[in-house]
């Protein structure tokens, strides 16, 4: 969740990255994914607790599918790797 939040932040889709926690405990992961769910809803990417669970449990292909969906939606908005923010 933390790395996905960082990615969304760098694509200027997330403004509250300071709320993310870079920890691997269950509560931190759930908090991070709750924030991500709101951001993904704004860009019209279907995301729910089942998808979060699949990613947390490292289900094969779960994160790849989500990243593809995010990329597709961002490209439709005119956002691509070429105009990636270099925020740190």
Image (cartoon, rainbow, N blue to C red):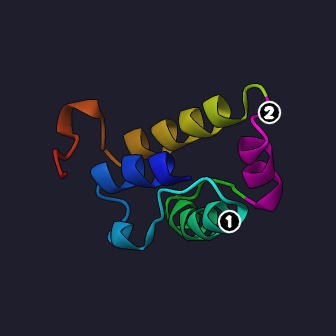
Give the residues drawn in magenta, as a range. 48-59
Viewer-closest of 34 and 77: 34
Q: Identify the mark nearer the N-term, 1 or 2.
A: 1
Identify which residue is drawn at 36% across, 66% down: 17
Drawn side of residue 63 relative to residue 57, left or right: left
Q: Quadrant of residue 63?
A: top right
Rounded to the nearest angstrom, the CA distance separating label 1 from label 2 is 16 Å
Q: Is residue 75 above or below residue 32?
A: above
Q: Position of residue 68 (x, y in %)?
A: 56, 32
Identify which residue is drawn at 79% across, 51% down: 53
Q: Is residue 41 above or below residue 2?
A: below
Residue at mark 2:
59
Residue at mark 1:
30
Residue 24 belongs to magenta span: no
Identify which residue is drawn at 50% across, 65% down: 39
Q: Position of residue 5 (x, y in %)?
A: 45, 55
Q: Quadrant of residue 19?
A: bottom left
Secondary structure under tag 1 reads helix
């Amino acid at each position: 969740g933390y790395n996905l939040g960082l990615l969304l932040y760098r694509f200027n889709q997330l403004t509250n990255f300071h709320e993310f926690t870079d920890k691997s405990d269950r509560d931190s992961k759930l908090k991070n994914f709750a924030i991500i769910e709101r951001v993904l809803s704004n860009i019209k990417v279907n995301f729910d607790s089942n998808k979060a669970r699949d990613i947390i449990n490292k289900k094969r292909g779960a994160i790849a599918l989500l990243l593809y969906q995010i990329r597709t939606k961002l490209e439709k908005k005119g956002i691509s790797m070429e105009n990636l923010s270099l925020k740190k």
